[in-house]
Image (cartoon, rainbow, N blue to C red):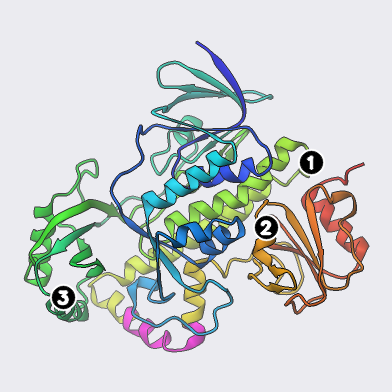
Amino acid sequence: MNSSRYDVVIAGCGPTGAMLAAELRLHDVRVLVVEKETEPVSFARIVGLHIRSIELMAMRGLLDRLLQHGRKRPAGAYFAAIDQPAPQGLDSAYAYLLGIPQPVIVRLLEEHAIALGAQVRRGRAVAGLAQDDDGVTVELAGGEQVRSRYLVGCDGGRSIVRKLLGIGFPGEASRTETLMGEMAAAAPGEEIAAKMAEVRGSRQGFWLRPVGVGLYSVVVRAAGVSDRAEPPTLDDFKQQLRAIAGTDFGVHSPRWLSRFGDATRLAERYRAGRVLLAGDAAHIHPPIGGQGLNLGVQDAVNLGWKLAAQIRGWAPDTLLDTYEAERRLVAEGVLDNTRAQMELQSTEPGPQAVRRLLIELMAFDDVNRHLVEKISAIGVRYDFGAGPDLLGRRLRDVELAQGNLYGLLHRGRGLLLDRTGRLTAGGWSDRVDHLADPTAELSVPCVLLRPDGHVAWIGDDQQDLNDHLGRWFGRPAG
């Protein structure tokens, strides 16, 4: 039985785990990712990257690679699949949805993490853990032990790490199930579009959306709640399509088939000593609105620099605690909005009356904008105390004299964006970059950005800035 030493072991090499590994490697943290599956998922399920996740990819220099494999779509019709156009003037340079196969996201993020120096070992399931004051001993299936300073469970909704910690996962079990898959259809596209409009008009929740020539994404209610360990069959889809739409559209040749329920659960806490949770290990919810993968990636970017700061020795005492304080509140909001969206999918008269009212309200731009910002996460504001509305929000990719803002955030460091030219990062310059640019497209004199792009301070006073540098980036060097 051998033992190896790392700074962080990450359980799970999905989008959350791979992104977290890359974020930690930006700060020279020794990372091992263990993944129970021997091979990446092969089926090409199309998922959507929302605006905030696209911004994060741009911040780390990954967006161009993702765009080569994705398809831009309008940033509308998110909430409960209500067909509304995207509001005009969304506060982002990336105001679109990026449809992309999930295996591509995982592969590109894993390659990015490995290029930065992370180690990834597949076919290695976590079987046990024990922690002490100095670190965590992680036991892998087969008896191998790995020693690290921290362990992060990014191992999905059935997280072994969460269960080993004994952290509760309260919420609601599935009441209904939905079938989802991608398959070819023999029926003409015009016939499919007409039937979908007719049936959805009668409030029977289902869709067939084209994702390629003759290929459709199909979502239809299941006949009941069943054992999710048993995958659905093509016949299950045909039966339910005929029951709801009166035809199965001649569907055939499925690329992948799955089922999901409306289970909604949130971990009681995100941290137990030196072990943390992120992504689906910390929260699960129905996929309506397409927020799950995005929420996990955003967890990773919030956690990465804070955990790295703890390991590198410069973190303020409470910095790592802000991960749970900030991200668990965001997850609560996502769980609530998916609960609401699922209710609006019901065919019962009450929910359908509310749905009709909401359709009317979404004709108002402010309402539509609010819901799009909620689903896409660009409306997130962390509580940093009293201050202007921009405080605690992410800053959009503003134009600078030397290019664009996000191009300066590839290294995952803080940034002082200074329009006055009078300020300095001083003893924090090993952690915080400084750009003096009087032409910066800002409505305030100066901002201090955290590595995740959220505004930690606004002002023009050096002493006030120093206080906030200390709050987020610890003691000055020297």
Q: Residues within 10 Å of mark 1 (few under 14, many from 20)?
A: some
Magenta residues, dominant SS class: helix
- In this rendering, is residue 478 above or below 203? above
Q: Which mark is residue 314?
A: 1
Q: Which mark is residue 426?
A: none
- Residue type at mark 2: give it: Leu
Q: Residue at x 61, y 46 (%)?
A: 23
Q: Residues within 10 Å of mark 3 (few under 14, many from 20)?
A: some
Q: Residue at x 41, y 28 (%)?
A: 125
- In this rendering, is residue 428 above or below 114? below
- Residue type at mark 3: give it: Gly
In the image, taking residue 288 as reference, residue 120 lies left or right, namely right
Asked which secondary structure carries label 1, the reply is loop
Q: Is residue 365 magenta?
A: yes
Q: Residue at x 42, y 27 (%)?
A: 124
Residue 365 location (% of width, % of height): 49, 87
Which contiguous range is marked in magenta? Answer: 355-367
Q: Which residue is mark 3?
A: 189
